[in-house]
Amino acid sequence: MTDRTENQQAARRSDATRATILAAARERFATDGYEKATIRAIARDARIDPSMVMRYYGNKAGLFAAAVAIGPDLPGLAVEPREEIGRAMARHFLALWEENEELTALMRVGVTEPHAAERMQSVLREQLIPLARRIGPDPDQAQARAALCASAVLGLALTRYVLRFPASVALRPEEIVDWLGPTLQRYLTAPTP
Amino acid sequence: MTDRTENQQAARRSDATRATILAAARERFATDGYEKATIRAIARDARIDPSMVMRYYGNKAGLFAAAVAIGPDLPGLAVEPREEIGRAMARHFLALWEENEELTALMRVGVTEPHAAERMQSVLREQLIPLARRIGPDPDQAQARAALCASAVLGLALTRYVLRFPASVALRPEEIVDWLGPTLQRYLTAPTP
DNA sequence: GTCTATAATTCGATAGAC
DNA sequence: GTCTATCGAATTATAGAC
């Protein structure tokens, strides 16, 4: 009993430390990218010793993998009325990026680390292309339609959250949905030009 | 006379060396980003001694600045018939990115280096926004329209030239113009939603 | 679990011979 | 102009005391 209680306490404290490390890692990776985000700086942000990071995550690559472990999900977007799928996707994209710092980190790192780029591509391959196949008028164009949707969404994320162009940051969420929604709608459902 | 001949020869050889260095630097910066592209590796690619890079460009930042010195120009796009401005911009974007490796380098580096990000933003600020102001129906929306065009263009560049998503690389140039053109056309000229 | 000390690399940059 | 040698700094990662 005493052992289990002690283990639980240890596990609890360990988990808290891990969570603190991961939060600091996400922030550093998101703002600095993979190379410039040093384990020392992350540990300093988390107010712990750098060696603890190594103890918990083995090496820097393991830390990054843990920091961006989750992947965005496109929930039942297919059940939307077909005429609203574009706006629904735009809204979903906005909500996702406004709150999840790790998506910014994944993008900043994916630009130079093939491993992170592959993680991003998997969302396109496993979720966006199947969605385009179900929704689009011509299933053989699903790859092209999905790629265009990805470029539209990631382009806005790039200018707004990564490069932080003032003109893009200034866009209000409703504006983004109003402009980006019809673009996604056309990419997904318009007849092939 | 002999002196000038010798100087000219030296200058010529020096210019050739500089050009070789810049070509290697562009390639390294484009594929590896700023941090991972080491002076040593660039010098090895150029088949010269690393100290020559320092001699010619002072430091790593100077080398990068020289490697991406040019800036893309949006030529007389405004003289296009207003209904074709979107497709014209898409075609111009494609031609630019297909041949200029330094644009890929600028993007890979701009994601983590504020200095390079500012260089990208200047194109938006000095060329795209004025264009949107001249062409768009409501000049006070020029910032938003230009930001959306930038996101559409840079989004495709990101997925096609930087992340190299197969579905995006597979797009044929004519396909891109057919899909992206109407998007840019709407961002620039459609009434504010 | 936590921290100190340090090994092992790597890189940018400099000095100086030729 | 070109190259060798090297410095100084920063980093990841390990070993081990407590």
Image: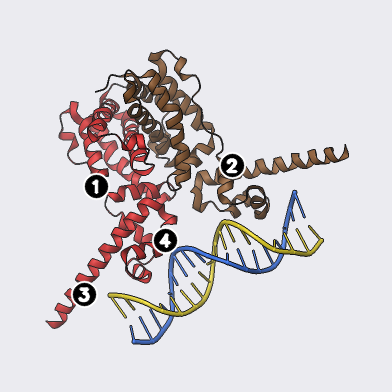
Chain colours: A brown, B red, C blue, D yellow
Q: Which residue is mark 2?
A: A66
Q: Quadrant of residue A3?
A: top right
Q: Are marks 4 and 1 on the same chain?
A: yes
Q: Which residue is mark 1?
A: B99
Q: CA distance from mark 2 to mark 1?
A: 38 Å
Packing grade of label 2 (10 A; few <14, some 14-19, many >=20) is some
Q: Which residue is mark 3?
A: B10
Q: Is residue B155 among the parts visible in the rendering? A: no
Q: CA distance from mark 3 to mark 1?
A: 30 Å
Kind of element beneath mark 1: helix
Q: Quadrant of residue B87?
A: top left
Q: CA distance from mark 3 to mark 2?
A: 54 Å
| Comparing labels 3 and 4, the label whose residue is closer to the camera | 4
Chain of the residue on which disc 2 is drawn:
A
Kind of residue at disc 1:
Glu
Kind of element beneath mark 3: helix
Packing grade of label 4 (10 A; few <14, some 14-19, many >=20) is some
Q: CA distance from mark 2 to mark 4?
A: 28 Å
Chain of the residue on which disc 3 is drawn:
B
Q: Check the picture and name the quadrant holding the C terminus of chain A.
A: top left
Q: Are marks 2 and 4 on the same chain?
A: no
Residue A111, x across and y down, in percent: 42, 45
Give the mark nearer the N terminus: 4 vs 1.
4
Kind of residue at disc 2:
Ala
Q: Is residue A10 among the parts visible in the rendering? A: yes
Query: Against B153, is A58 above or below?
Result: below
Q: Nearer the viewer, residue B68 or A133?
A: A133
Residue occupying the point 43% across, 48% down: A112
Q: Nearer the viewer, residue A17 or B185?
A: A17
Residue A82, x across and y down, in percent: 39, 14
Q: Which residue is mark 4?
A: B38
